[in-house]
Image (tube, rainbow, N blue to C red):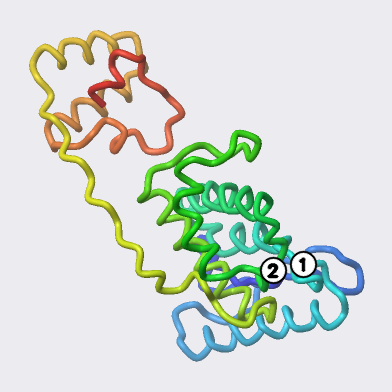
Amino acid sequence: MASIYPKQRSPYWYVQFRDPRTGKLVDRSTKLRRDDREQTRKAKQLEAQHTANELKHGGLAANGSWDWVSDYLAGKYSDSPLTLARYKQAWFALKGYFDAKGIRTPRLLTYEQCLAYIPWRQDPPTESGVRKAAHNTALLDLKVLSLLMRSAVQRGLADSNPALQLGIKRIASREKDEITEEEVVVIERELATEPDYLRFSWQIAMRHGCRLRETCGASTWKPSRRASAFL
């Protein structure tokens, strides 16, 4: 389905849509500026027009499925790679839930199914391929779902957004234990053979009160079993 999105170093909104005649994905500038409220409104109107045109001519999402979600996220968050990665993770888990529950289209989603997602996400069936997650992670997934359902309503794929204002609250995080001098020795020994940026991250964390994972960004590095207990 159609979506507008920004590009780095460009003042204009870009629009992405699937040509209903050829089925090819089209990506072009709208020549409408992002810093102008009226032009932004016109860009959103253009997005809606392309979406309606796809549906009218039998576009890929005309059957009301979830096929449009990946393209929508990729376009909307193209300039925010960390946000895009997190939202893709949420969508992977949500899609696993939909497949398990037979929720094949946005129109089939109910308020009760949104509430039931929390316990499912905390203990998903093995065959779903979804990993267990904490309550707050599941809650973030539902916020992503609310965003997707809002778009589904705009696209005419659902009558309402059942994921809006569920009234589920976050659970306060457990207070982390203070790292002792003995544990510092273990961590620094484990980091001695790791890349320099990890040791620098550790030094930043110790001086600013951060967890090491909070200073490593999107690194794929994983600490050893002994060190991970303190990180």
Compared with 105, 186 (above or below) is above
Q: Mark 2 points at which residue?
A: 16
Residue at the spot of label 1: 26
* Nearest the eye: 6 or 45: 45
- Disc 1 or 2, which lies upstream in sequence? 2
Give the x, y percent position of residue 207: 12, 32
Q: Position of residue 121 (x, y in %)?
A: 49, 47
Give the residue displayed 72% in from the left and 61% down from the top.
Answer: 104
Which residue corresponds to the image point at 43% horizontal and 51% vertical from the top-left?
A: 138
Check if mark 1's residue and mark 2's residue have beta carbons within 8 Å: yes
| Quadrant for the C terminus in the image | top left
Task: Report the front residue among 135 and 199.
Answer: 135
74 horizontally vs 138: left or right: right
Residue depicted at 43% across the width and 37% down the height: 218
Residue reaching furthest to the left: 181
Q: Nearer the viewer, residue 95 or 187?
A: 95
